[in-house]
Every structure is written in C-alpha cells, then in structure tokens.
Image (spheres, grey):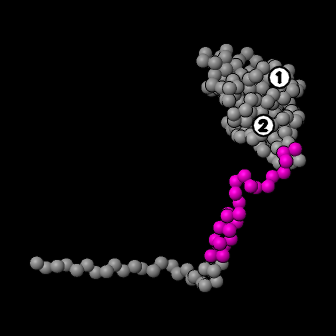
Amino acid sequence: MEESIMAAPTFERGPKFPISRRGVLVGAGGTLAAVAAGSLWRPGLAHASPADETNDVILKFGTMAGVSGIFVGAPTNPDGGTPIRGIHGGGFPWTLDEAKGELHSNGRLRVRVRGLVLAAGPAVGTNPIPTFRAIVSFEGAAPIFTDPVLASTTGDADIETTVSLPRPGFAPIIFVGPGTAPVWFAATGAM
C-alpha cells in the first residue's frame, strides 16, 4: 500500500510591521501600569466627598419624550396605560419641541421645557394645564415631586429647585407632568 506524505504547510508573511525591543518594553510597561492601577482600586474604597459638599452632575439631558402609545393613560387608553416606575402617562398623547435639564448630586434640579402640548384630543397643539412640576424617580425609591411652576398655554416652563435625593440612588428618570396629579406628560428619553 502506498502512503501519501503531506507536505508541510507554508505560510506567507503578511505586511511587515517592525517590532522593536523598545515597542515591546513600552507596551509591557503600559500593561503593568494598568494592572498596578487596577489593583489599587477597590469598590467601596474610592474616596468620595460627602454628598452635601459636591455638585456633581448625576443626569444631564437635552431631550425628553412626550407620552404616547402604550404609555397614554385613561381615559383614552382603555387599559389605563403602561406606567413607568408606577407613574402613569397623561390621558392624551403629548409632544414637545425642546427639553433640557440636569440633576446634581446635591439635589439641585433644573428642567426647561418648550412646546409641551397635547398631540391629540380636543385641545391639540395647546397646553390646557396651568402648572407643571418635575417628578424625580430613582429605581426602588419613592418618586420625588417638585412644587408646581407656571406653564404657558404654549407649553413652556422652567423648573429650578432642590430636592432631597435617596442614598444610594440608582437609574434616575425625570418626568414633567401637571402640578396637581401624579402623572407625566414627558420623560427623559428620545422620540
């Protein structure tokens, strides 16, 4: 019986990338520095200033999404709408032209909405609600309602206040709703 002998595979060299001894040492030094820095950091051991002394931004946003679709609450949604963190959307769809704001670690909150108006219903294109307020929601914590501020019939309002934040506080969401009911017309997010 005849045995076949396979030839050893040959490999073609690709483009030449010169590797210098210095490049290897610098790369190894960078890796060692990263490992050393990583070994110094331990969760819970990082130094943080007391919350009352800091003003770090927790959440900064340049857009909000108006209540729509499955989030629209009663009376126009027969199922009552799907709440977000237990807070129902308004009874009609809402839209807005502009929103921005920020929440700081010391509780300072600023929210600016422009053109927050009804997107459907008898008063479409207007805001029939005289006051808006912000609702600050953290995962696993009770919602925080700000005092109401005046809102124009064109849906413009500026909310500037300080709220007491939960500690720890996870995954904040900012809502804007009427000054008199625990529902929302816009929430941090994008359309």
Does residue 93 appear in the picture of this structure? no
Asked whether 34 falls inside the magenta stretch, the response is yes
Which residue is more in the foreground, 84 or 141?
A: 141
Residue 33 percent location from the top left of the image: 68, 71
Asked whether 154 falls inside the magenta stretch, the response is no
Residue 100 percent location from the top left of the image: 80, 39
Camera-side mark, 2 or 1: 2
Looking at the image, residue 152 sits to the left or right of residue 177; the answer is right
Quarter of the image with the C terminus in it:
top right
Which residue in the protein does label 1 denote? 179
Residue 28 percent location from the top left of the image: 62, 76
Q: Quadrant of residue 38?
A: bottom right
Residue drawn at (87%, 36%) of the image: 162
Circle 1: residue type: Gly
Q: Residues within 10 Å of mark 1 (few under 14, many from 20)?
A: many
Residue drawn at (55%, 80%) of the image: 17
Residue found at the far front of this picture: 45
Tell me the element at label 1: loop
Q: Residues within 10 Å of mark 2 (few under 14, many from 20)?
A: some
Circle 2: residue type: Pro
Looking at the image, residue 161 sits to the left or right of residue 83; the answer is right
Q: Which residues are magenta?
A: 27-52
Residue drawn at (57%, 83%) of the image: 18
Residue drawn at (86%, 30%) of the image: 157
Q: Magenta stretch: dominant SS?
A: helix
Is 8 above or below relative to 87? Answer: below
Quarter of the image with the N terminus in it:
bottom left
